Image (cartoon, helix red, strand yellow):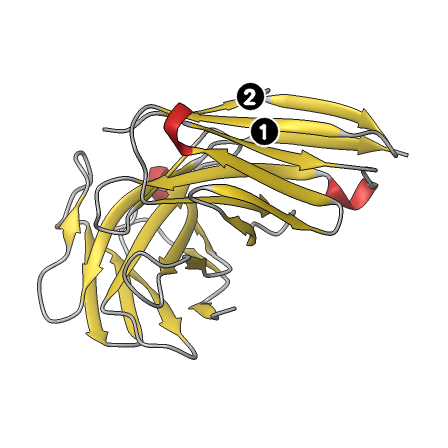
């Protein structure tokens, strides 16, 4: 199957700082990638859709100025959590479909802890 | 938006037992996938099954799209099967997957 990577695997930052998380498709190109957030013992919630060549689209209730998404190339999307607060501590997972409507593959996730 | 309901929420089995996990969805779907989330959080693709039946070793899945449900069967369960199983569907045509709440499976030796 296709491979999606994320970096870093985990990160600890201080409140008020910004953190960037990378999502890469390693063996295919993805014009669209997706960012999810998972709180402990909960399900995955879609945050936003990252579109190559255009602006990201955000789910209702997700602050676009706080969670900056940049689809830098056909294999890379980044999520920047700006002015992080402890309530932003969560597990962030990205996904990408190799082709439209195809099976989706998920990255290994990034565990963010804000102190 | 589309609703995805999984049952049961929790399941405890003795090693060797069989189990059936269910996923109901409220509208037509273009894609349905089953995942196993391992203790480190990685989602393992089990099945891509918008319709029909598939089998992979001790696991099999059936989706009846017209009746809006999917079943995941685990036979001869092993302790390594423990974890959370998620059903996710894509409905909008935009490839965005919506997840159910998951079934937490514990297999005891």
Q: Is residue B53 left or right of residue B31?
A: right
How dense is the environment of label 1, judged by Cα within 10 Å: few (below 14), some, or many (20 and up)?
Answer: many
Q: Who's the residue at 51% across and 60% down the image?
A: A108
Q: Residue B31: x percent and y percent? A: 37, 46
Marking on residue A82: none
Mark 1: secondary structure:
strand
Please tell me how crowded label 2 is: few (under 14), some (14-19), or many (20+) other residues with Cα within 10 Å.
some
List x then y, in percent, for residue A112. 43, 52
Q: Residue at x 27, y 61 (%)?
A: A100
Q: Depth check: A95 or A87 in front?
A: A95
Query: Which residue was labeled with disc 1?
Result: B103
Please tell me in which quadrant of the rendered image residue A95 appears: bottom left
Residue A115 at least partly seen: no
- Determine whether label 1 and label 2 are within 8 Å by CB: yes
Q: Which residue is mark 2?
A: B7
Quarter of the picture holding the N terminus of chain B = top left
């Amino acid at each position: 199957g296709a491979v999606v990577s994320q970096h870093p695997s985990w990160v600890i930052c201080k409140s008020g700082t910004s953190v960037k998380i990378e999502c890469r498709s390693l063996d295919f190109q993805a014009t669209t990638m997706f960012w999810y957030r998972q709180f402990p013992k909960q399900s995955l919630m879609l945050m936003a859709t990252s579109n190559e060549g255009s602006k990201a689209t955000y789910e209702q209730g997700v602050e676009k100025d706080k969670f900056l998404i940049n689809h830098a190339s056909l294999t890379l999307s980044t999520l920047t959590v700006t002015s992080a607060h402890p309530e932003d501590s969560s597990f962030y997972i990205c996904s990408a479909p190799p082709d439209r409507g195809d099976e989706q593959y998920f990255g290994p996730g990034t565990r963010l802890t804000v102190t | 938006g589309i609703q995805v309901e999984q049952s049961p929420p929790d399941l405890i089995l003795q090693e060797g037992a069989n189990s059936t996990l269910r996923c109901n969805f409220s509208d037509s779907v273009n894609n349905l996938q089953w995942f196993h989330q391992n203790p480190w959080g990685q989602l393992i693709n089990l099945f891509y099954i918008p319709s029909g039946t598939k089998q992979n070793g001790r696991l099999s899945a059936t989706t009846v799209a017209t009746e809006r449900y999917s079943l995941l069967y685990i036979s001869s369960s092993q302790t390594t099967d423990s974890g959370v199983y998620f059903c996710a569907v894509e409905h909008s045509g935009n490839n965005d997957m919506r997840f159910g709440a998951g079934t937490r499976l514990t297999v005891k030796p």
